[in-house]
Amino acid sequence: MSWEIERNRCLRCGACVSVCPELALDLKEDGVKNDAKKCTTCGICSKVCPPHAITVKK
Ligand code: SF4
Ligand code: SF4
């Protein structure tokens, strides 16, 4: 299981943070942070990311 982000592609739009049902994402000054303790790798965040910056593997 993994959650990865390509930081250079992220637009900082916040869409992923808004849709995460586990509240596992946070938009910080240096980019989006994933809390691995909360993330279930459901993949919803990667589906809504406009530039496809997030890759989730089960
Ligand atoms: S994979 Fe699911 S639980 Fe994990 S950060 Fe994305 S939306 Fe949240
Ligand atoms: S949805 Fe994508 S572009 Fe928007 S903040 Fe999240 S990772 Fe960045």
Image (cartoon, rainbow, N blue to C red):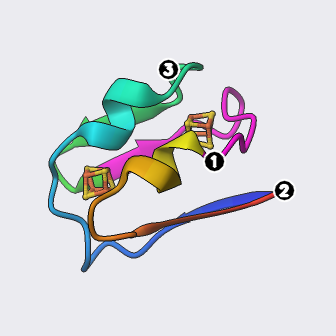
Task: Give the residue pinned by disc 3.
Answer: 23
Nearer the viewer's eye, disc 3 or disc 1?
Answer: 1
Q: Which three-letter amino acid code belongs to the residue tagged 2?
A: Lys
Asked which secondary structure carries label 3, the reply is loop
Is the CB–ligand 1 distance for label 1 below 8 Å?
Answer: yes
User: Helix or strand or loop: what does disc 2 sit on?
Assistant: loop
Residue 7 position by quadrant: bottom left
Q: Which residues are magenta?
A: 32-43
Closest to the observer, 8 or 42: 42
Marks 1 and 2 in Cβ contact (< 8 Å): yes
Apparent side of residue 16 relative to residue 1 in the rendered image (left or right): left
Is 34 inside the magenta-drawn segment? yes
- Residue 3: where, in percent of width, then height? 63, 58
Q: List the residue tagged with mark 1.
A: 43
Q: Earlier in the sequence, mark 2 or mark 3?
A: 3
Q: CA distance from mark 3 to mark 1?
A: 13 Å
Q: Are marks 2 and 3 in contact (CB under 8 Å)?
A: no
- Mark 3 within 8 Å of ligand 1, using the beta carbon: yes
Q: CA distance from mark 1 to mark 2?
A: 9 Å
Say whether residue 25 is left or right of residue 37. Answer: left
Image: 23 above or below 26: above
Q: Position of residue 38 (x, y in %)?
A: 67, 26
Tag 1, which secondary structure?
loop
Q: Quadrant of the N terminus?
A: bottom right
**Of pointers 1 and 2, the one earlier in the residue sequence:** 1
Q: Amino acid at mark 3?
A: Leu
Q: Which x, y percent locates residue 31?
A: 26, 55
Of mark 3 and mark 1, the one earlier in the sequence is 3
User: At 70% from the left edge and 40% from the top edge, which residue is drawn?
Assistant: 42
The disc placed on residue 58 is 2
Along the viewing direction, whichever of 48 and 53 lies nearer the viewer: 48
